[in-house]
């Protein structure tokens, strides 16, 4: 792991012995995870293995049946709705479904999270934040454009800029490159790394795109049978002789 990325020792998410079932469907059965400050962690797993359930438990959308989930020093299942909302402001999401509002300009789309969290009533400061976020994704010139005028890759960048507006400590990426051509997917992956370096953000990346994982992940956890089955860097896991691990890299 790159030790030059800041204080790698601070743990921003710690999950221990997480259990979650839906009726007889046992999804998570003793899952553990630690995410360090400034780290990009990829979670790999087959379809239906529980990656989305894990993310939903982390942001308090699903209550676990057992175990502990600590995010930025808070025990998520024990928080009141107000406390949960305050913690969620520090977590950015880039989900596949994170669509832009088609009836709003890029600028208005980026104002949206600030308005929702009643941040930055000062118009000038808000404009500076929007410009900084757009500069980070190389799209300052799109400020007054409508989403329909943008390509898929540009829309993804704008969605990422919108996530950056609130300067999150943690970014959760769910399939960030799905639906993009390989070149654009690589550009988004590189951008994810640039943002990680610039703001020392910590990320959990859920993706089936092994190129994206190779570019972005400092560490990978393979979620299988409800547990963290294997863990390591891309290079460590790609060299594994375990057929269960190998199948992800073939
Ligand atoms: N709200 C829910 N109620 C009942 N079952 C659920 C619920 N959410 C998820 N599940 C079940 O939990 C299991 C794991 O689902 P999950 O969506 O986390 O998989 P995933 O690893 O994210 O899959 P994919 O890669 O296809 O997105 C599935 O069997 C799913 O049917």
Image (cartoon, rainbow, N blue to C red):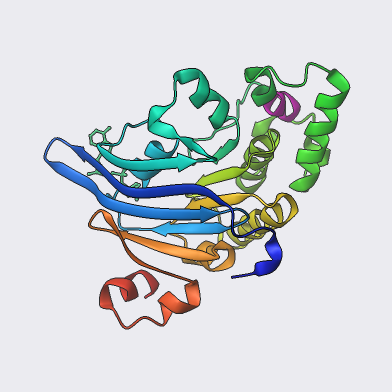
Nearest the eye: 183 or 217: 217
Would residue 88 be found to the left or right of residue 151 on screen? left
- Would you identify the image quadrant in which residue 249 lies? bottom left
- Residue extending furthest toward the right: 124
Q: Residue 238 at x, y = what percent?
A: 42, 78
In the image, is residue 84 part of the stretch drawn in magenta?
no
User: Magenta region, mostly helix, strand or loop?
Assistant: helix
- Examine the rendered structure and indicate whether residue 115 appears above or below residue 140: above
Would residue 134 be found to the left or right of residue 67 on screen? right
Q: Quadrant of ligand 1?
A: top left
Nearest the eye: 227 or 22: 227
Q: Residue 132 at x, y = what percent?
A: 81, 39
Residue at 61%, 58% (x, y): give it.
Answer: 189
The mark tally for this picture is 0
- Would you identify the image quadrant in which residue 162 lies? top right
Give the quadrant of the C terminus. bottom left
Image: magenta residue range:
105-111
Residue at 14%, 35% (x, y): give it.
Answer: 23
Residue at 39%, 48% (x, y): give it.
Answer: 15
Would residue 25 be found to the left or right of residue 226 on screen? left
Give the quadrant of the N terminus. bottom right
- Examine the rendered structure and indicate whether residue 143 appears above or below residue 111: below
Nearest the eye: 122 or 142: 122
- Examine the rendered structure and indicate whether residue 245 appears above or below residue 169: below
């Amino acid at each position: 792991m790159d030790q030059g990325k800041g204080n790698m020792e601070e743990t921003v998410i710690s999950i221990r012995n997480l259990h979650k079932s839906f009726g007889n469907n046992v999804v998570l059965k003793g899952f553990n995870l630690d995410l360090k400050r400034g780290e990009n962690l990829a979670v790999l797993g087959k379809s239906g293995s529980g990656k989305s359930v894990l993310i939903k438990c982390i942001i308090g959308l699903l209550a676990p049946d057992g175990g502990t989930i600590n995010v930025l020093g808070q025990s998520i299942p024990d928080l009141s709705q107000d406390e949960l909302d305050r913690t969620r402001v520090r977590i950015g999401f880039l989900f596949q479904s994170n669509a832009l509002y088609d009836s709003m300009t890029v600028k208005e789309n980026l104002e949206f999270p600030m308005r929702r969290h009643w941040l930055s009533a000062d118009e000038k400061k808000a404009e500076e934040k929007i410009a900084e976020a757009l500069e980070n994704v190389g799209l300052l010139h799109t400020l007054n454009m409508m989403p329909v005028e943008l390509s898929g890759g540009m829309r993804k960048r704008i969605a990422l800029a919108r996530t950056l507006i609130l300067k999150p400590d943690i970014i959760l990426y769910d399939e960030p490159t799905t639906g993009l051509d390989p070149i654009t997917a690589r550009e988004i992956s590189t951008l994810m790394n640039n943002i990680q370096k610039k703001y020392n953000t910590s990320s959990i990346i859920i993706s089936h795109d092994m190129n994206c994982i190779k570019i972005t992940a400092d560490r990978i956890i393979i979620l299988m049978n409800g547990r963290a089955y294997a863990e390591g860097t891309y290079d460590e896991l790609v060299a594994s002789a375990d057929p269960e691990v190998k199948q992800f890299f073939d």
